[in-house]
């Protein structure tokens, strides 16, 4: 199995990345501007805090039509309403999402709005696999890690919800990725070891 996803957070690279502000929407200059406004006091301070909180919520996503679950180290997003409609399937498909370098380790925080939009509008189940390998150069390892986590999360979700509600084998599976995550998806579907880990026939 791939290395623990939390290993990277204990490294000096993560600490440097965290302090840079790059993982937050916008640039470092924008964050510095917010800090200057908050230190100026008065009504602007409260306004700055409100804006900051709204931006945080927007990045993570707050759509009331969806539900987030943490399963087998993955961020899983699915519709809250899981009653099977008369004129269609309960879920239209399953999405395996892989993010880009660095932010791919935090898919819910970095891609929450996009993922929630897919789920709410398409009645999809999205399994976003945080991948510590995206921070390194061993992309084969990252592909295996992503594949293994995806398969494990789908198995656990099937057990938790019941096969009558969710069965990955019965749903069309779509790969969606950003940046380096695209390469990981290609590797995952091209190498037999990773295909086996992901349960791809």
Image: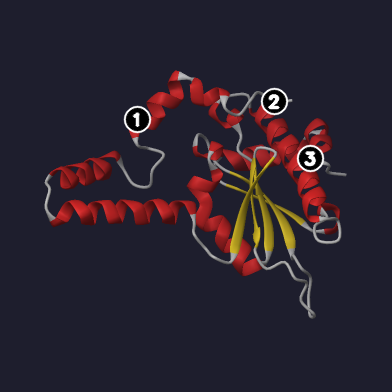
Judge the density around disc 1: few (<14), some (14-19), many (≥20) Cα neighbours within 10 Å.
Answer: few
Q: Mark 2 highlights which residue?
A: 2
Looking at the rendered image, the quarter that the N terminus falls into is: top right
Q: Position of residue 26 (x, y in %)?
A: 34, 47
Q: Position of residue 91 (x, y in %)?
A: 74, 65
**Location of residue 67 by image quarter:** bottom right
Closest to the observer, 3 or 53? 53
Q: Mark 3 highlights which residue?
A: 198
Q: For the residues marked 2 and 3, what is the alpha-carbon distance in whole angstroms?
A: 13 Å
Q: Earlier in the sequence, mark 1 or mark 2?
A: 2
Q: Position of residue 112 (x, y in %)?
A: 52, 53
Q: Earlier in the sequence, mark 2 or mark 3?
A: 2
> Does residue 17 appear left or right of residue 103 in this picture?
left
Q: For the residues marked 1 and 3, what is the alpha-carbon distance in whole angstroms?
A: 35 Å
Question: Which mark, residue 141?
Answer: none
> Does residue 191 appear left or right of residue 49 in this picture?
right
Q: For the residues marked 1 and 2, what is the alpha-carbon distance in whole angstroms?
A: 27 Å
> Does residue 89 appear left or right of residue 8 in this picture?
right
Question: Which mark, residue 19?
Answer: 1
**Location of residue 153 by image quarter:** top right
Closest to the observer, 201 or 146? 146
**Tag 1–tag 3 contact (CB < 8 Å):** no
Quick one: SS at disc 2?
Answer: loop
Q: Earlier in the sequence, mark 1 or mark 3?
A: 1
């Amino acid at each position: 199995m791939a290395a623990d996803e939390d290993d990277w957070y204990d490294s000096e690279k993560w600490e440097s990345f965290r302090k840079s502000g790059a993982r937050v929407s916008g640039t470092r200059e924008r964050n510095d501007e917010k800090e200057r406004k908050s230190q100026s006091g008065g009504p602007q301070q409260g306004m700055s805090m409100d804006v900051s909180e709204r931006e945080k919520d927007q990045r993570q996503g707050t759509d009331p039509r969806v539900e987030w679950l943490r399963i087998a180290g993955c961020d899983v997003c699915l519709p809250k309403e899981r009653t099977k409609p008369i004129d269609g399937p309960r879920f239209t498909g399953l999405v395996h999402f892989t993010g880009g370098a660095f932010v791919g380790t935090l898919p819910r925080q970095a891609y929450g709005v996009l993922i929630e939009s897919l789920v709410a509008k398409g009645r999809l189940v999205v399994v976003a696999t945080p991948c510590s390998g995206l921070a390194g150069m061993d992309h084969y390892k990252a592909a295996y890690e992503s594949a293994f986590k995806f398969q494990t999360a789908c198995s656990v979700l099937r057990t938790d919800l019941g096969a009558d509600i969710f069965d990955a084998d019965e749903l069309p599976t779509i790969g969606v990725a950003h940046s380096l995550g695209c390469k990981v998806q290609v590797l995952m579907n091209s190498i037999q070891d990773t295909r086996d880990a992901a349960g791809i026939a």
